[in-house]
Image (spheres, rainbow, N blue to C red):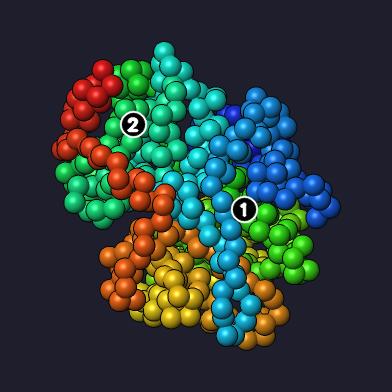
Amino acid sequence: MRFVSTRGDTTVSLDAALVNGIAADGGLYVPVELPSFEVRDFEAATTIPEVAATLLRPFFSDSSLLEDLEQILAETFSFPIPTTPLPMRDGNASLLELYHGPTAAFKDVGAGFLAACLGRLEGDAASPLTILVATSGDTGGAVAAAFDKRPGMRVVVLFPEGRVSARQEHQLTCWSNNVLSLSVRGAFDDCQTLVKAALADAGLNSRYRFSSANSINIGRLLPQSTYYAAASLRHLRGAGSKPGFVIPTGNLGNALACIMAREMGLPIGPIVLATNANRTIPEYFSTLNWVPRASVQTLASAMDVGDPSNMERLRNLLGEADVLRECLGVLSVDDAQIEAAIRRDYADFGFATCPHTATATHTFHELDDELRRQHDWILVATAHPAKFETIVEPLIGASVPLPDELAEIMARPSRSVSIDPQLGDLAAAMSGHFG
Ligand SMILES: *Cc1c(COP(=O)(O)O)cnc(C)c1O
């Protein structure tokens, strides 16, 4: 399979798309065509890695990684992704728990897969590849966890000092020697500016072989399609119908993976996007005009995106708003509704949902009655509530138990180096740590 930029027509191999991340013309890589499947193609596949191997093999047809695909998938899916039935009064729903990975959020899947691919393509003990990642909280932890201890690979995580939660900071600072955690005396934007300056610096670049692992890499998107494929097949086999999905949405990476799975022929019914108060996507669907804007802060902070970059891929794949709104639902959920949903979920389920997941449970209850009753629904849980305990615990009036994967991380020693947002400070910290 070849990959092409959303802005041009020169094609590249999967290996090049994974290593480059973003196309030279600034566009995003998309497969030249989506393979097409029938349910019976998955007859022999029951586990997620088995479903994933069938689904992803066509994308790897001319990749040097083809022979390693099963091993890559075994490394990626080292944790379960169960669906749990939910006791709902007004319809049939279950929860797709994407939060059992090392940092308890769905980004562990994409980061783990990308690390397994890049480690094989670019890992070099004599001259390690160095991944630079600026993070406002969550992404950096998933990337650090994915590359932790990986031979021939290093990670430098930059986060804004004092602006991430205590648990988030721990997840950014508890890794092995190949991960350097930098607490930057500035804001997230300063971290991002510093990464850009480092990537553009010829001297540093030749010394450290820089790369990035940003969320628009096709290697983050492909593995996400596989849990939608596996969950929909499981539902079809058990209940005999195609489930609908409600997906908390920020940069549109997770939802796009579900849309791609449906386009490839997986038994997926309606797809509904749940956004927070960042309304760029719902406004695009209603006005037909794409107007990206600055993001606003909400309780579902990992979805605070005003210019979702994967919209460029979605428009390339399906079409403009007039087409998109025919095949996708969308609802914007504000902070007051998120708070109410967290309370209601706790009362209804007996366990807490995170603020991102709460946008999906709220949206489920707001679906048109007939639509809600016509289908069984799978609500996507993108993070464990224990990651956002400062928001969730006061709302439910109870403490959220730490899941094993987070408890294990919190028990590790933490270390970071504090720097000013200056390229000279970054260079000194790197040479102090890596030599
Ligand atoms: C990143 C993230 C989202 C949003 O996913 P997108 O792929 O950006 O739409 C939702 N919830 C959590 C917990 C996240 O970390």
Q: Distance between the residues labelled 2 and 1?
A: 29 Å
Relative to residue 278, is residue 324 drawn left or right?
right
* Residue 294 lies in quadrant: bottom left
Are the residues at dot 2 and dot 1 in contact (C-beta closer than 8 Å)? no
Could you tell whether 70 is left or right of 41 in the image? Answer: left
* Residue tagged 2: 176
N-terminal-most mark, 2 or 1: 2
Image point (50%, 40%), residue name: 112
**Snapshot quadrant of residue 223:** top right
Is the residue marked by circle 1 packed among few (<14), some (14-19), or many (20+) residues within 10 Å?
A: many
- Given residues 254 and 351, the one toward you in this image is 351
**Where residue 58 appears, x then y in whole percent?**
73, 38
Circle 1: element type:
helix
18, above or below 382, in the image: above
Mark 1 vs ligand 1: CB under 8 Å? no
Residue 227, which numbered label?
A: 1
Report whether 122 appears left or right of 317: left
Give the residue type at disc 2: Ser
Residue 344 locus on image (x, y percent): 43, 81
Left or right placement of residue 111 versus residue 385 in this view: right
In percent of width and height, residue 63 lies at: 66, 28
Residue at the top extreme of this rendering: 126
Amino acid at the residue labelled 1: Tyr
How many callouts does the rendering have? 2
